Amino acid sequence: MSGPHVRNDFSGEAGQVFQAGGDIHYHDHRPAAPERPARPYHIPPSTPRFTNRSDELARLHTWLGRPGSGPPRTCVISGLPGIGTSSTARRWAESVRDAYPGGVPYVDFAALRSGADGGDVRGAQAKVLRSVAGVGERYLDLPGPELDDLYRTETSRHGSILLVLENVTQPAQVLALIPTAPGSAVVVTSNKRLDELALDGAQLLSLEPLGPGHGAELLATLCGADRVHAEPEATARLVELCGGLPLALTVAGTRLAARRGLSLASVVTELTAERGRLSTLSIGSGPGRRGVAAALSVACRDLPGRTLRLYRRLGLLPGRTFPADVAAAVDGSDPLTVHEALQDLYSASLLEEEIVDGKPTGRYGLHDLVRLHARSLAEGDGGDTEAERDGALRRVVDHYVVRAAFADGAVMGNRLRITDHAVLLAGHESPFTGSGARNDALDWLEAERHNAVAVVRAAAGLGLHRQAAQLAESLTALFLNHRHPTDWVDTGTLGAGAAARLGDRAMEARLRSLLSRPLMDMGLTDRARRELDTALERADATGHCVLRASVREFSARYWDLYDPPRALAQYGEALALNEAAGERRGVALVRYFTGCTQDAMGEHELAVGTLTDACDRLTALGDARMAGRALAALGRAHGHLGRTGEAVRALERAAQTLQEQRASFYEAPLREELADHAVRAGDPAAARRHLARAVELLQRDGSPRAGEVRERFAALTDGPDAPAPPGA
């Protein structure tokens, strides 16, 4: 049986349809799903002058590996502006681009931030969806959760993806964009450290400045290897002045390339003046000006106000590295506020944390060019006023004066001082307490040595003469134990000059007499004599018995070199003045130096008696450092009398005491003497032990004699199983 042919046409969207018979023709007018575009590769090309970073690229290969199975992996490449994070990411992406069938999309959050969407994560998701899956605009206008679902779906459909995200500022920007296809990878670049992403499994790669060799290599690619090879010293200095920062080196090299007649030495001369360095390391003019300052200004743009203020003021610090309490002093704020601001700067890669032996020291530093930028902000329009800058520096000076005075007291005990510590330290709490106070104070002085020298100079420049003199006096607590003669001469000269401007004869006499010691160590005996003559005149004008005695003691030590009988006469005057003043420590010190002179004059038996008396007095006073020195001198006197056993026992005890007191300047030569005794006694193992300790001390103090003593050690070392020379 047949019936009429039935035909139903449905156009547009249809709901439920039931057809009992015949043909159905359904026309769906909804847009068809877009075809996926060709595999995208949207990363801008890396610089053709890419230099070094081989270790970093190898780590990226290890961490991210080849695409395949497994969850997506992420690596964050961070560093200060201009360090080359983008170049490193792009170079690695270029090397593996063909291994990702889903493509290599790219998002620059700096470009998004400058657009209408303000850098929204949704804008970044839309960009990836357009490039990877060809999703049209009409499908991207979705609520956030639905767009997230679409992103996860589409990035799982087309094979593993390598996603490169540049100029990221927030961890959330990364987490929302991780592709879901197995074997995918995300490479992130940021001037912020984004350490929080490590909690989500990300690897963190922080780029460091280029070393001298690779810095020179980058310059050579820019301006020509012939020019770099023709001026090796200027090249090394140029890399140093650029701080190994690739952006700075690129600007300098581009200038050289554009001007073939310009020598590297002339660029070095321009950069040597700190105030013009950032300007020299810039190209262009107006809003399009490029260079280090522009890059750093971008990095500072999003800093909170309090953090930007600290950044500016850190540029004013006289030293290179600093602990948090110094940051609080220059900022004029409480430790909690400063801690938070320091963390902001660290996260923004504008601050470096000092690491020694893999452990943080609690100290921070600014890259040289970052420090200059911070200072330029402090001194520029919208920065601090001159009064505010001077106030910040005064707070730093006062901080060091107080802290160094506490350290001086902990290290040296009750010694002669012109600074009245009872007045200076009233209302302050000592940071050096307990059984380890002396060593802690000595460690602090050593750690802060370079800064403290710079602070003395800054105080003198600000006209803070009292503080400059007080700090110079306190720093001798370090120099008497660890020497550092150049720094001692610098601070002593500045301090004595400051005291002279104040008209403080006592302080001037004290500092000039102390100054004679490093001058004599450096062989500048004529100047030492002039300083001592002035010190004697100033001290005698004060009527201060203990000061007059002390200056005579220093003067006698000069005459020990040229006229021992005259030295003994001056020691006698110093002894009488100390006894009249009831100055027990002064008496003990004079007895020690007198015994040394007697021994040098051949009066060895007399010297043994004098030095024994000095050692007993110093031990009773609790002055272990000087007691150790007296014991060493006593051992030498016994040795001169042929009493080898007594000599070695005294020298061994002295070395142990000086080691406990961290008095390396005096312990090192003592170890050499003990090695000589051990060699003569036929005990090479003991000799090697003492020489190894001497090398350790000399190397730590930067002594040029370290190599000579190491050679002595090597000469005593025979056989295949013998230890290597220290420091080899």
Image: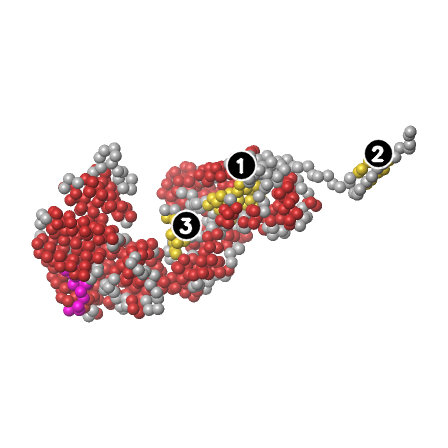
On residue 271, which mark appears? 3
Above or below: residue 265 compared with residue 364: above
**Residue 467 seen anywhere in this rendered image of the structure:** yes
Residue 519 screen position, x and y as percent: 23, 55
Residue 618 screen position, x and y as percent: 18, 60
Q: CA distance from mark 3 to mark 2?
A: 86 Å
- Residue type at mark 3: give it: Leu
- Residue type at mark 2: give it: Asp
**Magenta stretch mostly in which secondary structure?**
helix
Mark nearer the N terminus (3 vs 2): 2
**Quadrant location of the N terminus?**
top right
Above or below: residue 649 compared with residue 593: above
SS of the residue at dot 2? strand
SS of the residue at dot 1? helix
- Left/right of residue 477 with respect to residue 586 in the rendered view: right
Question: For mark 3, does the 10 Å Cα neighbourhood hold few (<14), some (14 to 19), or many (20 or more) residues?
Answer: many
Q: Is residue 581 magenta?
A: yes
- Left/right of residue 588 with respect to residue 432 in the rendered view: left
Q: Which residue is mark 1?
A: 94
**Residue 563 seen anywhere in this rendered image of the structure:** no
Mark nearer the N terminus (3 vs 1): 1
- The residues colored magenta run 580-591
Residue drawn 25% across and 62% down?
A: 413
Mark nearer the N terminus (1 vs 2): 2
Nearer to us in this view, 55 or 52: 55
- Count of residue discs: 3
Residue drawn 57% across and 41% down?
A: 163
Question: For mark 1, does the 10 Å Cα neighbourhood hold few (<14), some (14 to 19), or many (20 or more) residues?
Answer: some
SS of the residue at dot 3? helix
On residue 23, which mark appears? 2
**Quadrant location of the C terminus?**
top left
Q: CA distance from mark 3 to mark 1?
A: 35 Å
